[in-house]
Image (spheres, rainbow, N blue to C red):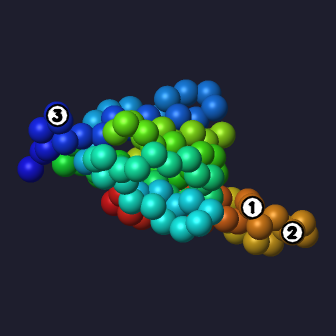
Amino acid sequence: MAASEGDALHVELVAADRTVWSGEATMVIARTVEGDVGVLKDHAPLLSLLTDAVVEISAEEGDLVVAAVDGGFLSVANNRVSILSERAILATDIDVSAAQSELESARTSDEDDEARIRRAEVRIRAAERSS
């Protein structure tokens, strides 16, 4: 059941080069450096650092929007949620084969590249959650 307009959060998921998703939602779940945060209508103001993780947005129409973000910031104020990340991609746009190849390449690399491994794993988890 969709929420009425007065029960919604306005959410903006923004990457450095574009708006990835924008709309009304009933809930947002994101992982900050302090842990997972769930945001509902009338949430207290919040500004927090995001980790490389999956973000879930329960859209007002009932759809679940899943995205992978490469860190960034989460801002909540006055029923507006801004998720700002250098790179963000919707789960439906993730090429799982490419992410798996990237993960394997990062794991077998001579370089210690934990960030590359973590980001590939996040993309795979995001794609799995949306299917």
Mark identifier at residue 115: 1
The structure residue drawn at horizontal position 45% and vertical position 46%, both measured from the top left corner, is 45
Residue matched to label 3? 5
Q: Position of residue 8 (x, y in %)?
A: 24, 40
Residue 56 placed where, x, y %?
A: 39, 54
- Do the numbered discs 3 and 1 sit on residues whose CB atoms are within 8 Å? no
First-in-chain label (2 vs 3):
3
Q: Amino acid at mark 2?
A: Asp
Question: How far apart are the two marked residues, 2 and 3, measured between alpha carbons?
Answer: 48 Å
In screen coordinates, is 5 left or right of 75? left
Q: Quadrant of residue 85?
A: top right
Residue sitting nearer the eye, 57 or 10 = 10
Q: Quadrant of residue 88?
A: top right
| Of residues 45 and 53, the one drawn nearer to the viewer in this rendering | 45
The residue sitting at the front extreme is 44
Question: Residues under labels 3 and 1: Cα distance?
Answer: 39 Å
Determine whether the residue tagged by mark 2 lies in a helix, strand or loop.
loop
Q: In the rendered image, which residue does mark 2 sit on?
A: 112
Answer above or below: position of 101 versus 71. Answer: below
Can the viewer see residue 99 in this picture?
A: no
**Residue 117, horizontal then vertical, whole percent:** 70, 65
